[in-house]
Structure formats: structure tokens, C-alpha cells
Image: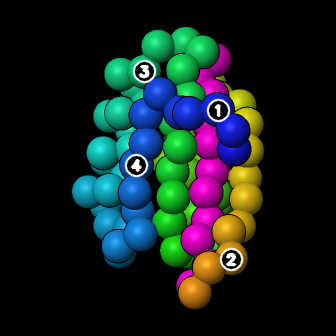
Amino acid sequence: MKENANHTLDFKGSITPMTFLKLTNVFRAMQSGETLEVTGLDEDIKNDLFKVLRELSYQVVADEKIKDVMPLYRVRLKKE
């Protein structure tokens, strides 16, 4: 992902209801056209994001798996 995101969230720790609340609050505070990059260790992070943000309008700009010592998953969403 070459372009920097306007907002980033690091979910490399455990995903809890509080992390999803934080995600929802950040996304709702964003302006139309801004991007949010979310990173995590769980390969289902994209599906989890869709469950939480299902009623909000966004576009998936990027979805990738980065191979290091342990896999890291990164999803970038653009608010519409």
C-alpha cells in the first residue's frame, strides 16, 4: 500500500468488543473520502470488519497478507 492512510488501528492483540467499539467510533468520525488502515494477526480480520461496519458506507481499497515471522493481515477501507 503506497499511499498513507488517514487513520490506522492496530488489532495485533486480541480482538474484543472494545476494539470493535473503537473501530466503529473512528470510522464514524472520519470524513467522506478518508481511509482507515486496520492491521491484525487474524486472517478473518476482513470478515470481522464487515460484520461491525455492515451498515456504514465504505469501499475496500486494499486487502493483503504480509509474510514476516508471523503473518500480518492489513485491510484498508475508504469511507464513502
Q: Residue furthest left?
A: 18
Q: CA distance from mark 4 to mark 1?
A: 16 Å
**What residue is at 54 percent from the left and 20 percent from the top?**
34
Q: Tell which tag, 1 or 3, sits nearer the viewer.
A: 1
Q: State which region is magenta.
A: 70-80
Quadrant housing the C terminus: top right
In the figure, residue 76 lies in which quadrant? Answer: top right
Circle 2 crowding by C-alpha within 10 Å: few under 14, some 14–19, many from 20? few
Kindly identify which numbered label has been placed on residue 37.
none
Kindly identify which numbered label has been placed on residue 3.
1
Q: CA distance from mark 4 to mark 3?
A: 13 Å
Q: Determine whether 79 is above or below 32 in the image.
A: below
Which residue carries the number 3 mark?
Answer: 30
Which residue carries the number 4 mark?
Answer: 9
Question: Per the image, is 78 magenta?
Answer: yes
Between discs 2 and 4, the one toward the N terminus: 4
Quadrant housing the N terminus: top right
Which residue carries the number 2 mark?
Answer: 67
Residue 44: give x, y in percent of width and height. Answer: 63, 69
